[in-house]
Amino acid sequence: MASLNITKIIRSFHKTPHYDLNFKPISHDFAPTEKQYQEAMIQLAWPMIVAALIFCLWRLIRHCCCERKKKKSSFNDAPDLTCARITFTVLAVVCAAAIAVSFAGNDKLTKSATKLTQHASNAKSLVDRVINATNIVADSSSSLSGFISSTNWSPYGSEVDSQAMEMASELLSSSTTLRGLAQSAGDYDPTDLNDAVLKYDKIRNQATLAFTCFILLLGFISAISICTRKPFFMLVSAFLLTLSFSLCWILGGVELALGVGLSDFCNNPGEYIISEVNNEEVKFIIACPYYPSPFEPQIMEASSYVNASYLLLSDIKNSTGDSFPQIETGILTLDASIKQLGLSLHCEPVHDELIGGIDALCSTGFDGVLSLLFSHTTCGFLLIFAIMILSHIILHTDKDRGYYPGRSLMYEEKTPFFSRD
């Protein structure tokens, strides 16, 4: 199999420790159907997911279960929240910039899916071309057989007539063999997964864009709530920020596992494909040029039938003294066509197209996954600080008079997410 452009970062992800749920090391070979490999991917994803849930529980438990001494304060003791507001605004802008990176990652994934399907379609066209050429040669052999069968051989005697029918039968067998070859080649359709790839890429694309726009809109709402000092909007923003943080880190955990799994596949895609399929044609194409051609026996069989028919024609010519130029020319042309067909049934063109699709998945697609991973984890990390700062601002913001900690405790009592530090 042709070598892929494996980058250092793909190799680094491939070297990520793989442990099953019993914390036993397992092979790094891509094996998504095996239980241990699935457990290893879960082991990569769950820490970030659990961290997100722990953070949310901590915000709840800190208010509900921890007793705190609430100090009374006057209006004059109200802290200056200008720095907190500026810091929150800066965090919102940086988080928006980080989440905007997901647009680029989303675009890369879409491009990789498009390239993958395009290369598969190109490979399908090459396979169809071979099938059509094979069927044309098979039709020629069948037509020549029909011509020989319809020829009146009785003037030459029963022996010649018998040889002629045998010659027609050999050519018909050659046609049948070639049609079987065409059917075998047609059993493999490189575009089988194209519809599924495009369908799920469309769903993923829409979901990613919707989530990204949601985060950007949330940042805008949060900034407006801080500027207008409206507690209701701040409470809504803080709740949505917590929800967004959880979603960002859940997505980050899934994308980390996806990145490692993709790096495992890209490290040796040919070995995985060959181990999973039972189609000899696929193995021949993927392992090109190291796997024996499944078409060669059929080409040799068809050629042997044509050679046998030529020998029979030679015997007829010797017996009758006639040359039968039309039949001889047809057999020689057919023999040359079969040999040319055998030369055209090599794996390189289709192999190169499939490798091009896999390379797009392992380069552009992997970069897209990394971009989404960076975007979501960075944004989630920044949202932790944004939530803490917004909680502090809410606790010191009075509904009517601006900053007033003496009466703002009602928000602490009603909203467990935003407890006083």
Image (cartoon, rainbow, N blue to C red):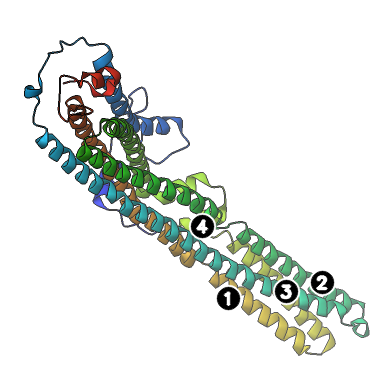
First in sequence: mark 3 vs mark 1: 3
Q: Which residue is mark 1?
A: 340
In the image, taking residue 349 as reference, residue 45 lies left or right, namely left
Residues 416 and 18: in front is 416
Is label 3 in contact with label 1 (beta carbons under 8 Å)? no
Residues 71 and 359: in front is 71
SS class, disc 3: helix
Amino acid on which disc 1 is placed: Gln
Is label 1 in contact with label 4 (beta carbons under 8 Å)? no
Amino acid on which disc 3 is placed: Asp
Residues 389 and 167: in front is 389
SS class, disc 2: helix
Pair 3/2: label in front:
3
Residue shown at 38% from the left, 53% from the top: 109
Is residue 92 visible in the rendered image? The answer is yes
Pair 3/1: label in front:
3
First in sequence: mark 1 vs mark 2: 2
Q: Which residue is mark 3?
A: 139
Q: CA distance from mark 1 to mark 2?
A: 25 Å
Q: Which residue is mark 4?
A: 284
